[in-house]
Image (spheres, rainbow, N blue to C red):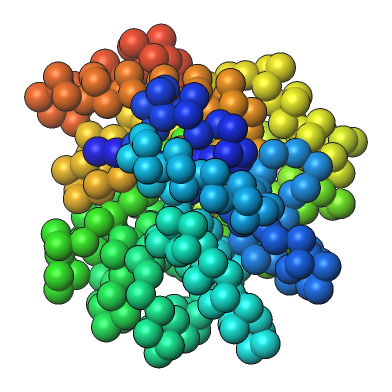
Amino acid sequence: MKVVTPLSNMDYYIPLVEAGADEFFCGILPFEWLDKYNVTMPLNRREYLLDNCNICTLSSVRILKKMMETYKVNVKVTLNSLYYIKEQYPLIVNLIKMLQDCGINTFIIADVALICYLREKNIDCNIHLSGECGALNHYTLNFFEPLNIERFIFPGKESIDNIRASIEQYKTGNKKEYESFILNDWCMFLGAFCNTVHCDEIPHSCHLPTKTVRIDKNSTKYKDIYHVLKLRNQLASKTDIVDRSSYYNLSKRRADTYNFAEKGCGICKMHKLMRSGITHIKLVGRGHTLDMVKRDLEFLKKGIAIMNTASNSEEFEEKIKLNIFNNKCPTTCFYN
């Protein structure tokens, strides 16, 4: 099982490789795109500029190419917007071709029409279906079969049973790669149905202080949903939006108060995910500081080492909770 790690700055590449990153994902945000479409028509849904979150120049990508040739750890680029308008498709194709010339040939894409467009134009690139697309079952996986998807990334709150069933019932099964979220940025919303704007100027919807309650407090229906809402209310009560307009302040504050897995975790489920067919786990954290990502990687690598010694999933969960969390499991779990 390999760890897919966020790359928010090209200077982070070598330290994170040395920390154990197996693969990177990053956002590309050309100033030409921002000048024409600003943040309201996002290219990768993380349109932050005040802090390290995207790579903004091709010269930086060319430097990355040299490092990839030396260290043999690949970088893939996110194109996570749920849709693009017609005039943007040729621009995206030109961007992809320029990135290919710089050694990047794998792209995380959420827009189905863009995937079809690339295949119709015979653009020879590797496509990973974004978790923002919403691969919810084997019908979704089979739908994309003609489009030659190299890897499917399951949404953050997809149940392990559903992941297993999707892979088992997918007609090409274990011939593909599968990725799931494992750490950070847990959100009550499903990306495929979220249209909030992630940028410096305004807080996104999941950071707005809200409280959701039941009309009938005695109702026992939809207990799983109420569990999620309870967690959401807990997060909202802790959220300070005073400085949310500055992503730099947010990431700095996070670094000053680092708590492993505080904002979302699935590490104790890694063994079950592996047995279900997951080949890669995603460490979320574009915009996080280098130190934060290195510390997250350290814990994940420790978890993988424990997994290699555990005889079953139950034993693995016990060891993880004891050795990493001191039997105090985080409340925001991706898979409960």
Query: What residue do we see at 75% from left, 26% from top?
Result: 252
- Compared with 67, 58 (above or below) is below
Query: What residue do we see at 81% from left, 42% from top?
Result: 50
Q: Quadrant of the C terminus?
A: top left
| Nearer the observer, 8 or 279 | 8
Residue 134 horizontal/vertical position (percent): 45, 66
| Nearer the observer, 30 or 198 | 30
Residue placed farthest to the left in the image? Answer: 311
Q: Quadrant of residue 326?
A: top left
- Compared with 92, 249 (above or below) is above
Left or right of 12, for residue 309: left
The answer to whether residue 155 shows anywhere in this view is no
Query: What residue do we see at 74% from left, 68% from top?
Result: 33
Residue 40 horizontal/vertical position (percent): 78, 68
Query: What residue do we see at 16% from left, 43% from top?
Result: 275
Residue placed farthest to the right in the image? Answer: 242
Q: Quadrant of the N terminus?
A: top left
The answer to whether residue 288 shows anywhere in this view is yes
Left or right of 293, for residue 46: right
Left or right of 151, for residue 275: left
Residue 258 horizontal/vertical position (percent): 62, 19
